[in-house]
Each structure stands twice: as C-alpha cells, then as structure tokens.
Amino acid sequence: MDDIKPYVQQHKDRFINELIDLLKIPSVSADSAYSQDVIDMSEAVKKSLEEAGCDKVEICDTPGYPIVYGEKIIDPVLPTVLVYGHYDVQPPDPMDLWTSPPFEPVIKKTEIHPDGAIFARGACDDKGQMYTHVKALEYMVRTNTLPCNVKFMIEGEEEVGSKSLGWFVERNQEKLKNDVILISDTGMISNQQPSITTGLRGLSYVEVEVTGPNRDLHSGLYGGAVANPINILAKMIASLHDENNHITILGFYDNVEELSREERDEMAKAPFSLENYKKALDIEDIYGESGYVTNERNSIRPTLDVNGIWGGYQGEGAKTVIASKAFAKISMRLVPNQDWEEITELFTKHFTSIAPKSVKVKVTPHHGGQGYVTPTDSIGYQAAAKAYNESFGVKPIPVRSGGSIPIVALFEKELKSKTIMMGFGLDSDAIHSPNEHFGIFNYLKGIETIPLFYKHFVELSK
Ligand code: BES
Ligand code: MN
Ligand code: MN
C-alpha cells in the first residue's frame, strides 16, 4: 500500500477530469424536469464501476430512481465491505447566487482550499465523495491489493428521502450481506484535523397548510375582521419555541437521551473557534437552545426549523390582499431514541391544537428517518481511525454530526451491520447551498485513505 500516494499523484488529473464529467450531469432528484439526467447519471456510475474493476455491475430498477449495484468478490471467506453513496444532488437554486453555473464545474482556489476546489452542485454531496471509493477500488484492483470483497450500492434518491432504497434493502438482504458498511457522505473538522462521524440526527419533515377564508380578500374590506392565515401561521410557528429556545411540542423531549457530563466534556475537546464560526457566517451572535454550546446544539440536541414559508402576494410592487392560504415546510432534526414517526404524530397533534378556530390546518408528512450512533470500539471504527492517522498524520476525532442519512439506521436493522462514516468534506464546502465545492486536497486524500481502511479492516478482522 506504499504506492497509493504516487498512484494518486500520477493519475490525479484524470481523477479530477472524470469527476468533472460526472458533475456536468444535473441529477437533481427532487425536480422531475431532471428525471432523464438522473437516469443518465445512474448509467455513468455503472460505467465507472465497470472501469474501476467491479466484476458485476447492474442497474437495479425500483419504484423510483434506479440503484446502481456493483461487486468484486475475490474470496467468499474474506470479509465484505459494502460501500453506500448517492448520485443524486440537491436542486441548484437560488441560481443567481452561484459565481459559476452549478453544472459547469470549475476549479477555484479559496482560503480554506489553497490547492483549489471543484465548484459544482454535488461536488462534495455526494458525487465527489462517492467517487473517492470508485477510484480507491481502481487503485486496489490495478495494483492487485484489494484485500477483501467489496460491494457498491449507489442510489439516486438520497436527497428526497431514500424511499426506494428501503424497498431495495428489504428485498435484497442476501445480495447486500456484508461485514461493514462504509459511507463517505459526511464531513470532517478541517484538513488539518480529520474526524470520523459517529452519529447522525434523525429527521421528520412536514409541510403545513393554513386556510382562512375561501378566497383571497381585499385587505381593507376584510382586514381585521377575519383571520389572516399568514399572520396566524407566523404566530403558530413562533410559538413552537419558548424563550429558552426549547421546543414546546408536548412530549417532544420524552425520549431524548441526555449525554453525561463526561461525554459532553469529551465533545468539548474538539477544536472549535466561535469567533471564526461567526466570521464565516457573517453573524454578530449565535442563537440556540439555552444550556448547550454550539457543537451540542447542532449535533446531540433535537431542533425544529422552518425551511420555507410562503403565501400571499410576492410579485412586484404592492397588492393589498389577505391570502386564503399560507404554507410552510418544517424539519425537525432528531436524536437517537426519538422515533421519527412518533414525533411526526406529536407535531401534527400539537400544531393542529394550537390553531384558532378561524382557520383550518393541514399537516402533510414528507419523509423522515431515525438517528444513528456508531460505537468507537468496533473493528470498523478502529480501522478507519488507523487509516486517517496514516494518511493525514493526525489522529482523527470522533464527532457526532447534525446532518441526517436516514437510511443508515435502516441498514443496521435490516443488514445487521455497523456503518462507518468516513467523510472528507468540510462544513464550509457549502453543500445544499450555492457555490458547493469539494477541495482537491480532500478528494485526493479520500482516495488515499480508503485503501488503508480496507487493509486495516481485514487485518483487524483476522
Ligand atoms: N450528505 C448529507 C448528510 C450529511 C452531510 C450528514 C454532512 C452529515 C454531514 C445528505 O445528503 C443530506 O443532505 N441529508 C439530508 C436528509 C435527507 C433525508 C434529505 C439532510 O441532512 O438534510
Ligand atoms: Mn449526501
Ligand atoms: Mn445532501
């Protein structure tokens, strides 16, 4: 494995160009206008797995977008690593905030990425990170150093809730049998301080509709005499947090696991600068649940956020009107032990109960999933820690992330194996935002680190 660094150096231009080609395909799963592109992307992933040396690659049809499955089984008695990733991306909007078009990748230098970063939707989440595994496989196959079996399962609906993946996993337990699941779809602290994600938050995502009068009304003739659904919705949303920024939904915190003082002290050791945090976001002050610090608020604590809110007149100029309806999309990030379906029910009950009689309320659940915590004493975690230590020259820190990959909890339930989350992105890479990017350093380091994981995992499994 000594030749991984020279191999990456020798092939890095090709690696970058191949990723750039994948990033040109606008595989936006949320918007049906891109459905052919999502299909095209699955074909491109299939081709890349074949070229990297998988023996069997197939496009598996599902009720939704296809799942690309590939494998290289060298000896059934050896351990099997199952790699999961996603080839779909978030919608690129708002378009006007991109400094270069989202599906025309370009390399630009930034303060954090002095060696350059590839700017494109999906660069980090998750095409770039997913592709580190394809190129790591290429290296191991070409140099005859693949030490175990490998399976790839790359889906196209992660950004919209992984519905078909649940369907697929339930039906293909034998095919997907593995000893460890490996995912690069999270981040690390910084390029100088790698970290391994040991936790993900769960999610409940709902849409609410508040209806007042049966039609839009003149706001002079009717204003003050009937409920304005936008006013009411704003009030209802505001009431979901109290003055300490605790969520007011009855029963919301019932199953929340409180961390011990020791665990919280351990978390506090991860490097973090509040000053830099505020500076990077251009905010005067932070905001959140009292009693918890930033790194706790965004990882071990559940939250509720409005993701979008609309209704009424939004065109040019002024129109005096009381809209008939107001809408909002609300996400709740959950922590382990909170059941997302139960929380969705609690939300629905609560939100309906706080509405005045003068409006009707409809709550529509979108999708959700359970949180996840992976132990640090597993062979998989230990192998990952050794791999980072070798490639970065720094011991990685375990970190619980605030993001969600709902399918991970389902993997554990259905496939009975632990997931190791070796992320190579940074929080500043602007995933889901305009100008998403992935550092060239991070991309190449990912490719270098993964074969080391395989080596250590097989050694520790003996
Ligand atoms: N890769 C992200 C999740 C992530 C990013 C976890 C960084 C940890 C660190 C994933 O693609 C994602 O965006 N998940 C969604 C949930 C999904 C159901 C839409 C999320 O977290 O909002
Ligand atoms: Mn992702
Ligand atoms: Mn995402």
Image: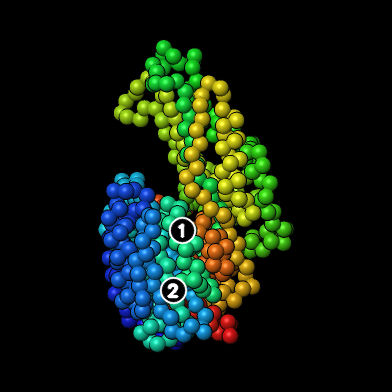
In this view of the protein, can residue 437 be seen by the observer?
Answer: no
Residue 442 falls in image quadrant: bottom left
Which label lies toward us, 1 or 2? 1
Mark 2 — residue?
A: 151
- In the rendered view, does 375 fall on the left or right side of 28? right
Name the outermost residue toward the right: 261
On the image, the x and y values in percent for residue 236 come to: 55, 31
At a point 36% along the width and 27% down the height, the residue shown is 313
Q: Is residue 87 above or below residue 95?
A: below
At a point 53% along the width and 53% down the height, the residue shown is 369
In this view of the protein, can residue 356 be seen by the observer?
Answer: yes
Which quadrant: the C terminus?
bottom right
The front one of 269 and 273 is 269
The front one of 274 and 394 is 394
Tell me the SS state at disc 1.
helix
Q: Is residue 13 above or below residue 329?
A: below
- The amino acid type, in three-letter code, at marker 1 is Trp
- The amino acid type, in three-letter code, at marker 2 is Lys
All told, the count of numbered labels is 2
Q: Tag 2: Cα neighbours inside 10 Å, few (<14), some, or many (≥20)?
A: many
Q: Is residue 437 above or below residue 354?
A: below
Query: Does the beta carbon of the residue at mark 2 sit less than 8 Å from ligand 2?
Result: no
On the image, the x and y values in percent for residue 358 come to: 53, 21
At a point 57% along the width and 34% down the height, the residue shown is 351
Query: Does the beta carbon of the residue at mark 1 sit less than 8 Å from ligand 1?
Result: no
Any mark on residue 167, and which? 1
Which quadrant: the N terminus?
bottom left
Residue 126 falls in image quadrant: bottom left
